[in-house]
Amino acid sequence: MPNQFCKTCGGSLESTNPNAGCPRCLLRMGIDEPTIAQELQRFNLPTPEQLDRAIPRLDVIDLIAHGGMGAVYRARQPELDRIVAVKVLPAELSKNRLFVERFAQEARTLAKLNHPHIVTVHDSGITGGWCYIVMEHVDGITLRDAISQQAISPEQAVEIVPELCEALKAAHRQGIVHRDIKPENVLLTRDGVAKIADFGIAKLLNSAIETDFNAGTRRYMAPEQLFGGTDIDHRADIYSLGVVLYELLTGQVPAEDYVPPSRAAEIDKRLDLVVRKTLQKRPELRYQDVREIAEELEQMRKDDEMPARQKILVQANQGIQWKSRARIFGLPVIHIATGFDPKTRKKRIAKGWFAVGDVAIGGFAIGGLGVGLIGIGGAGMGLVGIGGAGIGLLLGVGGGATGLIANGGGAAGGIAVGGGAAGGIAVGGGAAGHVAIGGGAAGNFVAHAAGVSPPGWLDNTVIGSFVTETLPWLFSALLPTIYLCVLIPVVLTGLLALLKQRNPKDGEMLEGETAKPVPLRYLFGLGAAMVGGCVAVTAAGIQGSTILNQVVEVLKARF
Amino acid sequence: MQRKSQSDRFETTQWSEVLLAGNPNQLGAKEALDRLCRKYWFPVYAVLRKRGSTHTDAEDLTQAFFAEVLSDNKIAVADKARGRFRWFLLTACNNFVANVHRHQTALKRGGGQKHISINIDMESGLQRYKSLEDQQWTAEQIFDRRWALELIDHATNRVRDEYEARGKAAWFEALEPFIAPGTELPPHNQIAAGLNVSVGAVKTAIHRLRKRFGVALQEEVAETVHHRKEVKDELKILLDALTGA
């Protein structure tokens, strides 16, 4: 037999639903609970009726929400026949003259904010002892409500954030910092449009309250805000936005050592980087502008929309990546990188003392495009450049080679050796240079293969003098000048840039890490270049001894 | 400033709009009244049963009673009730019951058809009236006691709906007994385990639920009084009714 009497008040329980408890005690809840009117009074806020009397131009309908920071009422503007919201601040604030001045100033600033994603301010004033703001009435719920109903999917979160970025962009551009971005201050209309409310309120209230208490909600506040800094700029909003984003994605506010969203829930890994950058403790490490966040998300969306063919290409060509732990002067000893990084969808670049890849940059670089002290590749560039196109400051070897010493099918350089060679000292089938040795050689000091003399018509004609005098000068003087003035700076700059680059910590993004689109299959070029280079070197070698003798002869004749 | 003369406009409720207008044709008046009648039919039914009607008769009579209340001429009477719907209904109910014999005859003769049927489902009346406890009270006391219980019921539903709308139906289920416990309850840590949260979270949630319930009660009462100031008085009267003072 169930207990017939309430253990709290002793009354009989017979007549009630056993689940419901004691009706007397239940009724007492209603009696003990302060009424709304009492609550409003406690915070020095008006009842709807009082406010209605205080603002003649408005018909105040009812109370929407109230808290320690003020109350919001629904009202109607009869002349314009529209519904508005009225935010009222506690009466004691308006007693402070300084606050009232600041309030008026703030309202004027806020009125300048006119944006589809910001709750518009229509009017403001002081009446009956209360400071009030008349603003757009948003028919919807707060982001806080949406989150507790778990109504926001990660996809939707990624769509809301750019809207917030736009709003913040408009505000920051006018030098206005919100300082209190949190889900309670973001409204969602029935159509799902996001609107930010309460701009500037935090700062205003903060200035009024002389204690250390910060009006912004702690969990969403940037570290510089929390520690009471005076140097708070728009980047504090970016931090708060990051907290909101994290909460939208994972359902929880990030802790001191937060778990990356992709591990806490089923979230795209690319968002980890965005979240990390917004949540940097130091403002200078965050995104410096909300636009960057929006662009980042836009880029992700674009990547997702990449045509299928291209996506397959990227996915099929994921290549390999290996970086040695050991580093010298911060640069990895060995770095091998080919293909596309599936996460960032960008081409991989190998950077290291010994670098191998589609694009390789380093001390000894081998790749489709190799740039380095020794660059080898389809296009090899460097102090020593070897490749299909070999360009070297010192030594260029390749199908098309150019360098101080150039050796190749078509070689141009200080000392050029090749099928077609042009240079200070040119040796080749067709050689032109200051000292030219070859089958068809033209220059100041010419040596021909045995049995071959230059055509007679070259001797006393314009063409003849061009070929025998001007051309050699070009190759002996101009080319070296080009090397000095163009190639050396270019290659040195490249080397300097290489040495200046910090090494990326895992997951950290660096500027300029993307390669401009380079056609694929450079590895084929690398192979062909190496073969070609070998052949050229061999040919030169075979020639070598003969040439050497001839060079010596010529020099002997000269000096 | 003419519209400002109704200084009590913002603390009035829908019920009071009916009164203030004094015009039964006022937009929404009928609906407001209809809504309230649907909420509080049981006390009327209980009184009729106490006075000796059978369940079936009481059903018909209740229908007839409300039809009459909703008809034009009764609303003028409401003014005398000083704005409390409960009081108004009680008075009307007493009058009705005094003439119940006449009404009953009228029904039997088929006079009931011309009344507006408000179509309340009163099946549950039979079950709920079974309690013997009502026998020791007078009709008026029964009316008030039942009214109080209906009120609590409505407030509970209101809060339950809110929790469901926020996706917290499970919380409400688990914590409802804690609002004003009459008997022994399971310990907090058991509830916490069931909901997969901390004991602290349970305690906070209980506190919030109780506050919310208190406010819900006030809101329900506010619907039936003229002025928000009267809410606590009304609750005290109902509490007295339940304690048998």
Image: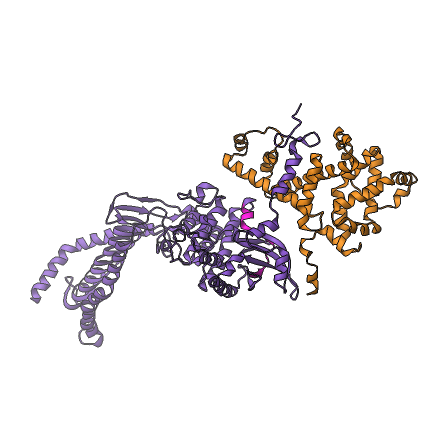
Question: Going 66% across and 41% down the picture, which residue do you hit?
Answer: B155
Outermost front residue: B245
Quadrant of the image for the N terminus of chain A? top right
In the rendered image, the quadrant that contains the C terminus of chain A is bottom left
Q: Is residue A138 magenta?
A: yes
Residue drawn at x 29%, y 46% as measured from the top left: A335
Q: Residue furthest right?
A: B109
Q: Which residues are magenta?
A: A131-147
Image position of A79 (left or right of A439): right
Q: In this figure, which colouring scheme has been used for the structure?
A: by chain
Could you say where residue A98 lies in the image, as x and y percent from the top left? Answer: 46, 63
Q: Quadrant of residue A417?
A: bottom left
- In terms of depth relative to the viewer, which is nearer, A345 or B116? B116
Q: Position of residue A186 (x, y in %)?
A: 53, 53
Front in this rendered view, residue A357 or A406: A357
Residue A117: % across, % down: 53, 59
A245 relative to A536 in the view: left or right: right
Left or right of A48 in this view: B56: right
Nearest the eye: B97 or A514: B97
Residue B236 x, y percent position in the rendering: 67, 41
Whether residue A82 is situated above or below residue A300 in the rendered picture: below
- Asked if the magenta segment contains residue A415, the reply would be no
Disc tally is: 0
Q: Nearer the viewer, residue B161 or A214?
A: A214
Q: Is residue A399 visible?
A: no
Q: Which chain is orange?
A: B
Rendered purple, the chain in question is: A
Determine whether A423 is above or below A271 in the image. below
- Relative vertical location of residue A274 with respect to residue B179 in this rendering, above or below: below
